[in-house]
Image (cartoon, grey):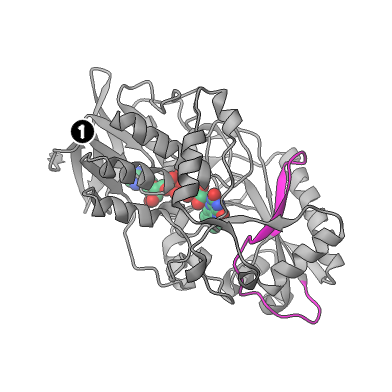
Amino acid sequence: MATREFRSDFDVIVAGSGPGGATVTRELARAGKRVLLLEWGDRPDIRGSFVQLASMVRRPGRGVLFTPDGLALFRNITTGGSSMSYYATAWVPPVEEFKRYGIDVTREVEEVQSELPITALPDELIGPFARLIMASARDLGYRWEKLKKFVYREKCRPNCDKCIYGCPHGAKWTARMYAEEAVGSGATLLNGARATRVLVENGKAVGVEFRMNGEEQKALAPQIVLSAGGIGSPVILRASGIRAAGRDFFFDPLIGVFGAAKGIRGGREFPMATGCHFEEEGYILSDYNLPAPLYMAFACEVLRFDRAFSHSRTLQIMVKARDPLGGRLTNRGGVRKRLSAADKDRLHQGCERAKGILKHAGAKNIFRSWYIAAHPGGTVKIGDLVDSNLQTEIENLYVCDCSVIPVARGLPPVFTILCLAKRLARHLSA
Ligand SMILES: Cc1cc2nc3c(=O)[nH]c(=O)nc-3n(C[C@H](O)[C@H](O)[C@H](O)COP(=O)(O)OP(=O)(O)OC[C@H]3O[C@@H](n4cnc5c(N)ncnc54)[C@H](O)[C@@H]3O)c2cc1C
């Protein structure tokens, strides 16, 4: 079947509209570049419902990927990528560490801070469970603080737990906002367009092949940026001849620890509003606050049917750990990485600490969830498969998303991705 050529008067093609892709596209469009943004997912209005989230993640191989251990790795295939479900925690990038790779993002950090609402939530937006957990942790001597969030406070509501569903109130900054701004500045967004391969001529990237409406199509441009996420970008790179992509990566495994609260009700709260980073131990603890249907699914998964209907009386703590680089992806994006004994031990230690905090808060009947993950990255590392300008060995082919982060930190990566994307856009506009 012949490949149809999509209109080809673009300066740059970006594949993927998560935090990396949406930011590069926005910056380039604002600088007057003609940008084509290919996005595999669609762009439904956010209803803020469990049903909508379930419809996004229900298809294995798309919204959820399973490792051989049965760990579920979640991502959103939709305009805005996983920022549609993220908890909006803004963790400052490791500026000094990036300097070792010849990358200085000082200016970009300042730019992001001045453009986006990065702030800890005011007390009235922090729910009773998060407050109780914070008080208990502090009482035990931990430096448990409010965490910084990408949140428009005036739009955020108390007694709301819809962040993970995409925030129907527009209170949480998401990459979809940048994708929409990019379109407002002249970028072309194609939804339902899955990039499959980069077209290369004489060692230079010249276009992208993609599938849309069941048809093979291609678009041409002198610069290509892959921003299909920690799993998506290496899959496209492999199909384009860079076979080493998708090896030795991280995904930041996590578990939930739950306990029955005494004399207090809540549960509909902003998640991850407060927490504590145990840097040496390699994990972070925070309040978790899964909405009721998700909590129920987590409880049933570990056969705690007795606790499945106790959401409004259950304190929740998330333990998220740093996992060492390892594993490999299959050519179709299958995740072949097992948690090592050390990974499990790290999570177990975090879990014991979380239990101590819950017990001190008066919780009983404590149990933990199975493993999940939500930050796949390091699959196309800086200093390995991309240089300090995020360019691959193929000239004019760049990667900009969580894939390029070279070290496992076990920390929320979006702020870092935004800075790298702004820096790349500056490089491409120059
Ligand atoms: C529940 C949850 C909570 C989280 N909380 C936080 C948090 O509080 N703070 C934080 O910093 N991070 C958080 N994260 C992680 C964060 O959302 C991701 O690390 C971030 O979105 C990654 O950005 P990205 O640009 O690398 O890719 P993604 O967000 O994965 O975006 C990739 C985009 O590419 C598209 N795509 C994929 N393949 C193709 C293809 N072949 N062709 C075209 N398009 C394609 C996808 O549909 C998607 O839109 C959370 C994640 C989840 C799931």
Give the position of the C terminus as an image quadrant: top left
Q: Is residue 206 left or right of residue 344?
A: left
Q: Is residue 362 magenta?
A: no
Assess disc 1: are there few (<14), some (14-19) or many (≥20) residues with their C-alpha within 10 Å of its C-alpha: many
**Residue 265 versus residue 57: which sits nearer the camera?**
265
Residue at 52% of width from left, 41% of height from top? 416
Callout 1: SS: loop
Residue at 38% of width from left, 33% of height from top? 424
**So how many labels did they put on this image?**
1
**Residue 418 versus residue 268: which sits nearer the camera?**
418
Q: Which residue is mark 1?
A: 221
Q: Is residue 199 visible?
A: yes
**Which x, y percent locates residue 209?**
24, 38
Q: Is residue 60 visible?
A: no
**Which x, y percent locates residue 66?**
54, 50
Up/down of 426 relative to 29, above or below: above
| Magenta part of the chain | 260-286
User: Of helix, strand and loop, which mostly describes the magenta segment?
Assistant: loop
Kind of residue at badge 1: Ala
**Residue 400 versus residue 422: which sits nearer the camera?**
422
**Which x, y percent locates residue 399?**
39, 33
CB of mark 1 near ligand 1 (< 8 Å) = no
Give the position of the N terminus as an image quadrant: top left
Q: Is residue 272 magenta?
A: yes
Displayed quadrant of residue 352? bottom right
Up/down of 389 relative to 257, above or below: above
Up/down of 269 relative to 330, above or below: below
Q: Is residue 377 left or right of residue 77?
A: right
**Which x, y percent locates residue 158?**
58, 75
Displayed quadrant of residue 259? bottom right
